[in-house]
Amino acid sequence: MPFVGNKFDFSHRPFGAFFALICTIVCLFATSARAEISAEASISAKDVGVGEPFQLSVQVTADDNAANLPWPTVEGLDKFTVAKSTGTSRSMQTSIINGRISQRNLYITTFVFKLTAQKPGTFPVGPIRYTYKDYDRQMGSASVTVTKQEAALNTVPTLSKKSAFVGEQVLYTLRIIAGQGVQQINYPNELQKLIGEKFFFQRLDKNIEPKVVKINGQDTRVYDVRIVLFPLLVGKAELSGIPVEYQQVTRGRQRRQGSVFDMFDDDFFGGGQVVTLTSVANPISMEIASLPEGAPADFTGAVGQFSLTATADKTTLASGEALTLTITIRGDGQPKTLTKPRLPDLSQFEVFDPEITSTSTIQGTTLVSTKTFKYVIVPHRKGEYNLGPVAFPYFDPNRKIFTEAKSQPITLTVTQGKESEAAPTHVMSQREITDIGSDIRHIKIGNGALHSEDDFLYRELWYWLLFLPSPIVFGLLLVIRRRSHRLQSDATLKRKTQASAQLRLRLKEANEALKQKNSRDFYKALSQAVVGFVSDKLNIEFRGLTEEEAKAKLVVHGLPEAISVEYGKLLQLCDFGQFGGSQRDDKTWKEALDTAETLLRKLDREL
Amino acid sequence: MIPLRNIALTIFLVTLTLGKVFAKPSADALARANRSFQEANAAYEKTDFKKAADLYRTAIDEGVADSRLYFNYANAMFRENQLGMAILYYEKAKKLAPDDQDIDANLRFINAQIVDKNPAPENNFLTKLIWAMHNTFSINQGLWICLALFTGIFMTAVLCLYAGAGLRAALYTLMVFAGLALCGIAPSLAYKINQQESLQYGIVLKQAVEMFSGPGENFPVLIQVHEGTKFEIVETRGDWVSVKLLNGKGGFVRLSDLGKV
């Protein structure tokens, strides 16, 4: 067994290893004979450094019947950072008992606790206990000593200045001091997240080469990561610590591991454990001041020291001939602030958009940017032209003033070109060259006579009146159609509406009879006109409408008594005329007709 | 109720007023203008550009606003090396015939030769397409189309009153398309009429003109503009005009230095 009593004891390593091997073999045979499950525990180291990982393994051997094995319980792990993992393997066990051969499968499950100590001290690991169904085993405990480990890598940040103006170049240097055992350094690659919000930045060196400097009188290997910063915001700007990840080999520590192969893991064989660690630089801060008032109108934010040169590729040329004006701005400001300079008056020239190139170089510990503008300009007319200075405004943080970088004036002599002054030739874009190569389009002769095309229709009243007929026609037809539909669906309304038409028809018949002096027909038509009008207006069936019934209906509809009486008298007169055989004169008939018309007008008004 | 007599009187007065505001050239004036136009064309063909320009000017002075006349006069002015006048009359012609490709070509050609580059803001593809559609019709063409569509919609509606169910569906579809077309053309037309009546452009006619920050020579000079540069005229104050360049810069120039489009 690999432990004595409740404590691991690996103080005599060769003996312990040999003993553990014998015990394991014995245990395997013993468990095969008597038990279906067994558990063993081992620890990889008992003397570790802070941050150095080590393992506690519990190996459980079980037969076919054991499934879903639980994790062992280990006390004292709260002092460590724990990462768990497990693995299972299978083996075949053959045994001969009383001459009979038998075989069975064994499943070996290893539960691994990867432990990392966070602080120095001596910490117990255990007791370790494994319980599964009726199997319960105590595997003792171990004591792990954690010692403080000297960091093999240190980082020291520095700034070239503690206060600066917005946009002024500041150098940030992160010195990485690598000690013994440092194998690999991973330089920070997430600078954008760490400093990108407050600064425009650019790394000066693509490759970081080590150099040896004296620190505390000793030659020490260091790596300088140099970053150029251009502050963006006013106020106190803090650069948070930049983490540097590195790998370190741990050597020389006495190891007492529970494996039989630990005898090979000593300093003689150059062994050691590689651990990955992180060193975080201390935060560092600086004060960022705003630029003073009084910036020129064309100031674009350039802060630093700048110079400007302007050259022409020729100083004597013909009108219409192109020359190239090359303007170079150079300085230690933020590259993006190097914008187009202010040109002198070039109204007598055709000026084309410049070709712009930019580069950055490192001069010592300073990032110097250069931007070149190549303008193609074409003089229109001959003459002597003095091109004034080209200027680029910037803020000088040393003198704390706004100033300008200026070029020397350039004198141009323009002679008469091939083309006349009146029609100067231009160097233009491709399309314009094509157009000039042709000519303006010829005059329009046309067949028709001239006419005033500004006689706009919207100024003519008749035009707007033309919009009226179509909606009016549509509206009228719509009304007619709706009325027609309504009359078709409503018989009462139809009778009422057509009552007047029917009346006119009957009165016409009466008039005809009057002309023919036919008394019977006259009174009959008159009677029908009166009764029919009332029946149509009151929606009562014409046939069988008695005088009394009609009079009662008129009263019910609120007509005055006098009208009702008058109605009765007229009907009696008509009956008398039809059936009495009286031979009245024209005057009597005319009076009867007038009476009827008067009554009908009253009825029409009241009903 | 408004008496019919009053309505008739109102219509008469409105017609009279409109007639006075937009006076047309008389038939005699038209005849004289046509004669001058033909003679000018002949002179131009013989490369007598000065005579041609004078004759075109005579026709224009008769009060005839014809895009061909303006175009030809602009051509003659260009030949006489008066770029400002040429651009002014091309612009006038374009106002009357917005879809004329010849006017656009000559304007492009001459604008490439003037001193000031005064480009209007670049349009994207969609905006260019909308402008192309907008310029497809002149104002009068658009007005006729609107009238035809409007009348057509109501006539179709009349047919719908008496048509059977099958035909009615087809007529409804027709009405919808006519309505959509009307909705597309009417705003474009309204914009054109608004531009015609309220927006005015000017062209610099002198070789170099100073633009002041106020209506007077005592104000600081902002920029110097040259012959042929196009302005939007914001307002006129006596002898001075408040103008705005196509790129948005503004100032005051003398009225006499400009030609109104």
Image: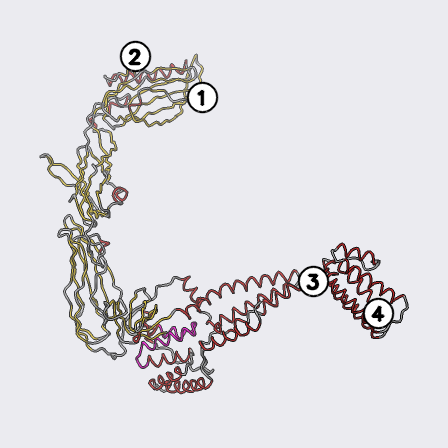
| Relative height, residue B21 to residue A251 (above, below) | below
The CA span between labels 4 and 3 is 34 Å
The CA span between labels 1 and 3 is 99 Å
Looking at the rendered image, the disc whose residue lies closer to the viewer, 4 or 3, is 4
Q: Are marks 1 and 3 on the same chain?
A: yes
Q: Nearer the viewer, residue B246 or A498?
A: A498
Looking at the rendered image, the disc whose residue lies closer to the viewer, 2 or 3, is 3
Tally of numbered discs: 4
Q: Which residue is mark 2?
A: A5
- The amino acid type, in three-letter code, at marker 4 is Phe
Q: Are marks 4 and 1 on the same chain?
A: yes
Residue at mark 2: chain: A
Coordinates of residue A531 in the picture (x, y in percent) = 80, 62
| Relative height, residue A84 to residue A28 (above, below) | below
- The amino acid type, in three-letter code, at marker 3 is Ser
Looking at the rendered image, the disc whose residue lies closer to the viewer, 4 or 2, is 4
Magenta residues (range):
B79-107
Which residue is found at the position 49% from the left and 70% from the top?
A: B142
In the structure shown, which secondary structural element does the residue marked by tag 4 occupy?
helix
Which residue is found at the position 34% from the left and 20% from the top?
A: A74
Q: Which residue is mark 4?
A: A522
| Relative height, residue A553 to residue A279 (above, below) | below
In the structure shown, which secondary structural element does the residue marked by tag 1 occupy?
loop
Looking at the rendered image, the disc whose residue lies closer to the viewer, 1 or 2, is 2
Q: Which residue is mark 1?
A: A64
